[in-house]
Amino acid sequence: MLITEKRILPMDRLRSLCVDKQWYTRGTNADYAYILQYAENLKDVKTENIVHIAKDILDHSDTDYPIDAVCFEIAMVCYSHFYIVKGELL
């Protein structure tokens, strides 16, 4: 059997993270709405999606956080779902 992971990043969790870390203080409402909606629309958050979100946050923030730390924080607020894929060997 094969087990696979899918991650989701709800908009409210990303918004809370930005508020808690005081990120996205230089973005417009449209910029902020874009990145929140981008995250919300992802059906399976991959590493490249997290990097895209982190870069956008850093582009619109006054912070000393390095990109790897921002990526880590984003990954920590994702929900992981694990699924058994039938008929596959582990």
Image (spheres, grey):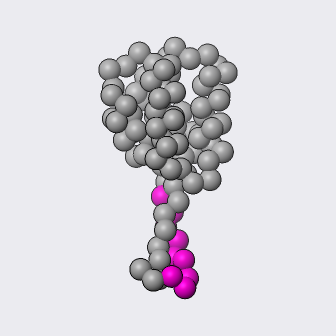
Query: Visible in this render: residue 23?
Result: no
> x, y percentage for residue 52?
51, 35
Q: Quadrant of the C terminus?
A: bottom left
Name the chief secondary structure element in magenta: strand
Residue at 51 percent across and 27 percent down: it is 56
Residue at 59 percent across and 41 percent down: it is 39
Residue at 57 percent across and 45 percent down: it is 10
Query: Visible in this render: residue 1?
Result: yes
Q: Residue furthest bottom?
A: 87
Is 86 one of the magenta-colored residues?
yes
Instruction: Decide: is 89 above or below 52.
Output: below
Residue at 63 percent across and 43 percent down: it is 40
> x, y percentage for residue 76?
40, 46
Is 54 one of the magenta-colored residues?
no
Looking at the image, which is closer to me, 18 or 48? 48
Instruction: Decide: is 5 above or below 14.
Output: below
Tag count in the figure?
0
Is 29 on the left or on the right of 81, as rendered?
right
Span colored in magenta: 80-88
Looking at the image, which is closer to me, 47 or 21? 47
Is 61 on the left or on the right of 66, as rendered?
right
Residue 28 position by quadrant: top right
> x, y percentage for residue 32?
60, 25
Instruction: Decide: is 4 above or below 68.
Output: below
> x, y percentage for residue 81?
51, 63
